[in-house]
């Protein structure tokens, strides 16, 4: 039965080529927009979610009361906060801070500037940045050691087997490579090409040890089953932080990217607003494409009334008519999906450039196909539902009654005078 629905649907699509083309193009444009926005939204929602301890990982933020009564919320934290949290808050398992910098690296004839981080020893304990070589518990122990990325290792040495090799920094330091970190994924807000011990940074910058300089991104890993509210209360005015008209608090690192806007010291939105807005726009555009499909299908209802009226007269059930309409809608949606995926691939480079992303379609990901087919199913049901309702409850109902009357009149005439000519009345 299902095969018959699609066979009839295919014949109707071939018969009405102009109508089919308009519908497929309309749905394709809607699906392309939905696919691109869906990829963008997925990337935003997945930002920083790959860390294994994400449920216990928090970023330390500060409310600064430097001007007026309303605080200004920032991510910069004084350097001494790290040691104070470790010493005074037993609920905290580990703390790490970093400062981002750019340095000039030289190996023989290859020289270039690379962005990286000066980090605390526990940095690789908090964050899931796998090492291709080296021991994560020891690679940052020495101020004269450096961890470089996989890309950087291949760029300067042509291989990732570089443990123990020397690389020159800023033309005045020679550092020994202690580890190679796997390239940082695109869905990480923390990006770097190299890591060095924060101790090396402190040696050259004494101000980093003062309470008055709010300069460093700081993160904590809470112990399992920790009462977050109790920790928040303890750290609020820890150490000398209050002397600088400031209070600190914790924000879940899984939410820090999307909820980065603060008003009066409380979360007031952030990029999550764009996620919601773009999602709503994508759904609206897709809905417009479906409405366009509905209007065209409804306009054709009068042309198809005779066909479906005959089907009802000769015994077609309501379920078979429903199957036929939905089969056509699903077939058009499927064609539109295939065209939409091909079109999305063509425009994706420009989309990435516009939004400064590195999005791609992962064809091996079952989640993508599940979502795409689910979107097609919903689109087909939505696009085919109203024309089906309209035809069943109005035009086709009147048509079927008229056709029944014509059939009865033709049959009586046929039985009376055996005139096959009267059968013409049934169809015209």
Image (cartoon, rainbow, N blue to C red):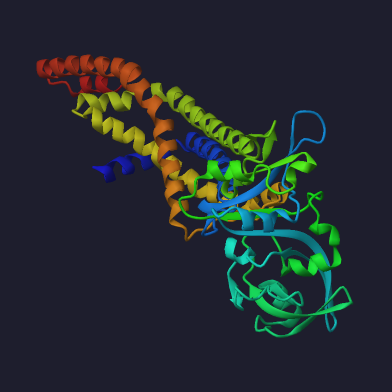
Q: Nearer the viewer, residue 12 or 28?
A: 28
- In this rendering, would 16 be left or right of 154? left
Say which quarter of the image contains residue 36. top right
In percent of width and height, residue 99 lies at 76, 59
Is 109 drawn above or below residue 77 in the view shown? below
Tell me the quarter of the image containing the C terminus: top left
Q: Is residue 127 visible?
A: no
Q: Residue furthest left?
A: 415
In percent of width and height, residue 331 lies at 40, 42
- In this rendering, would 214 be left or right of 301? right
Q: Is residue 87 visible?
A: yes
Rendered residue at 46%/46% (across/down): 335
In percent of width and height, residue 252 lies at 58, 46
Is 303 drawn above or below residue 208 in the view shown? above
Tell me the quarter of the image containing the N terminus: top left
Q: Nearer the viewer, residue 130 or 90?
A: 90
Rendered residue at 58%/65% (across/down): 125
Rendered residue at 12%/17% (across/down): 417
Is 2 drawn above or below residue 134 in the view shown? above
Is 389 drawn above or below residue 86 in the view shown? above
Q: Nearer the viewer, residue 394 or 307?
A: 394
In percent of width and height, residue 84 lies at 67, 55
How many numbered dots are placed on residues in this image?
0
Say which quarter of the image contains residue 284. top right
């Amino acid at each position: 039965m299902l095969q018959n629905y699609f066979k009839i649907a295919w014949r109707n699509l071939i018969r009405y080529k102009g109508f089919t083309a308009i519908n497929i193009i309309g749905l394709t444009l809607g699906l392309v927009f939905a696919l691109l926005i869906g990829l963008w939204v997925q990337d935003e929602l997945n930002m920083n979610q790959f860390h294994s301890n994400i449920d216990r990982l928090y970023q330390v933020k500060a409310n600064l009361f430097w001007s007026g009564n309303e605080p200004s919320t920032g991510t910069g934290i004084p350097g001494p906060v790290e040691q104070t949290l470790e010493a005074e808050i037993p609920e905290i398992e580990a703390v790490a801070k970093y400062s981002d910098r750019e340095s000039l690296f030289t190996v023989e004839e290859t020289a270039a500037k690379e962005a990286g981080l000066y980090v605390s020893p526990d940095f690789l304990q908090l964050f899931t940045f796998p090492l291709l070589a080296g021991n994560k518990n020891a690679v940052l122990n020495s101020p004269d050691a450096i961890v470089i990325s996989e890309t950087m290792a291949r760029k300067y040495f042509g291989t990732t087997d570089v443990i123990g090799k020397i690389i020159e920094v800023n033309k005045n330091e020679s550092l020994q490579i202690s580890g190679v970190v796997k390239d940082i994924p695109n869905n990480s807000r923390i990006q770097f090409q190299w890591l060095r011990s924060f101790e090396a940074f402190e040696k050259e910058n004494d101000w980093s040890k003062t309470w008055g300089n709010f300069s460093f991104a700081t993160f904590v890993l809470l112990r399992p089953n920790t009462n977050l509210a109790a920790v928040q209360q303890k750290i609020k005015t820890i150490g000398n932080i209050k002397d600088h008209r400031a209070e600190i608090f914790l924000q879940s690192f899984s939410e820090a990217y999307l909820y980065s806007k603060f008003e009066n010291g409380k979360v007031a939105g952030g990029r999550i607003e764009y996620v919601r807005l773009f999602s709503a726009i994508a759904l609206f555009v897709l809905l417009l494409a479906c409405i366009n499909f509905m209007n065209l299908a409804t306009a054709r209802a009068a042309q198809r009334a005779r066909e479906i009226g005959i089907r009802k007269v000769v015994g077609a059930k309501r379920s078979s008519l429903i199957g036929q309409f939905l089969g056509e809608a699903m077939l058009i949606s499927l064609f539109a999906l295939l065209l939409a995926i091909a079109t999305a691939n063509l425009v994706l480079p420009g989309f990435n450039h516009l939004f400064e992303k590195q999005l791609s379609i992962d064809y091996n990901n079952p989640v993508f196909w599940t979502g795409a087919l689910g979107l097609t199913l919903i689109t087909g049901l939505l696009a085919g539902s109203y024309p089906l309702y309209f035809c069943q409850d109005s035009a086709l109902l009147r048509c079927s009654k008229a056709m029944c009357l014509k059939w009865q009149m033709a049959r009586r005439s046929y039985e009376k005078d055996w005139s096959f000519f009267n059968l013409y009345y049934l169809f015209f």
